[in-house]
Image: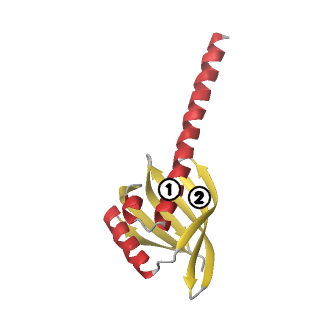
Amino acid sequence: MRHLTVYLCTALFFLASVSAQEVDHAATVEAYTEAFNAQDSAAMARMVTDNVQWLTVNGDSVAVETAGRSELVKAMDSYFASCASCRSRLVDVQVLGSRVSVIEQASWLVGDERRAQSSIAVYEFSGSRIARVYYFSTN
């Protein structure tokens, strides 16, 4: 009986630590989205690995949009300068181990009209930081 109790306690501890890690990954993606909406590329940079990659998946092709933290910051600063009204909202968040998949609704203004489109993105983590983002184009 004592062995069963030790086994159950160990199993519960393991499940609790996995759950805590998954919650942290989801929270990081949410914080990353908040930093995006604040157009704060420096805050975004603090949540990614040095060699982060942003990949766009379009049909049977995958394009590397950015590679590296400094390139991500440069790309985001350029993007924010071109679209001050761009915002993003996470519609659904699912965690599976080191990956977080989201349905994201991006929106922006055209004149006085707000336009929007939804996409799927998968955030891959290395430890507590985002290492790779797969963004599935809506084309």
Residue drawn at (54%, 35%) of the image: 17
- How far across and down, in percent of the image, does residue 44 sit? 41, 60
State the image coordinates of residue 9 (x, y, percent, origin top left): 61, 22
Residue at figure coordinates x 60%, y 76% from the top left: 138
Labels 2 and 1 touching (C-beta < 8 A): no
Q: Is residue 71 left or right of residue 38?
A: left
Element type at marker 1?
helix
- The Cα–Cα distance between marks 2 and 1, rounded to whole angstroms, is 15 Å
How are the colours assigned in the image? secondary structure
Q: Is residue 52 above or below residue 136?
A: above
| Element type at mark 2 | strand
Number of residues whose C-alpha sits closer than 10 Å to that of mark 1, classed few (under 14), some (14–19) or many (20 or more): some
Mark before the other along the chain sequence, 2 or 1: 1
Look at mark 1 in the image and give the residue it sits on. 31
Label 2 or label 1, whichever lies nearer to me, is: 1
In the image, farthest residue toward the top:
2
Q: Nearer the viewer, residue 22 or 3?
A: 22
Q: Dot 2: within a 10 Å radius of its alpha carbon, few (fewer than 14), some, or many (20 or more) residues?
A: many
Numbered circle sitting on residue 101: 2
Question: Farthest residue toward the bottom?
Answer: 111
Report which quarter residue 23 is drawn in: top right
**Identity of the residue drawn at 61% across and 81% down:** 114
- Choose between 64 and 17: the one closer to the eye: 17
The quarter of the picture where the N terminus appears is: top right
- What amino acid does circle 2 point to? Ser
Q: Return the x and y of residue 40 as percentages of the image width and height.
A: 41, 65
Marker disc for residue 18: none
Q: Residue at x 60, y 80 (%)?
A: 139
Which amino acid, by three-letter code, is at mark 1? Ala
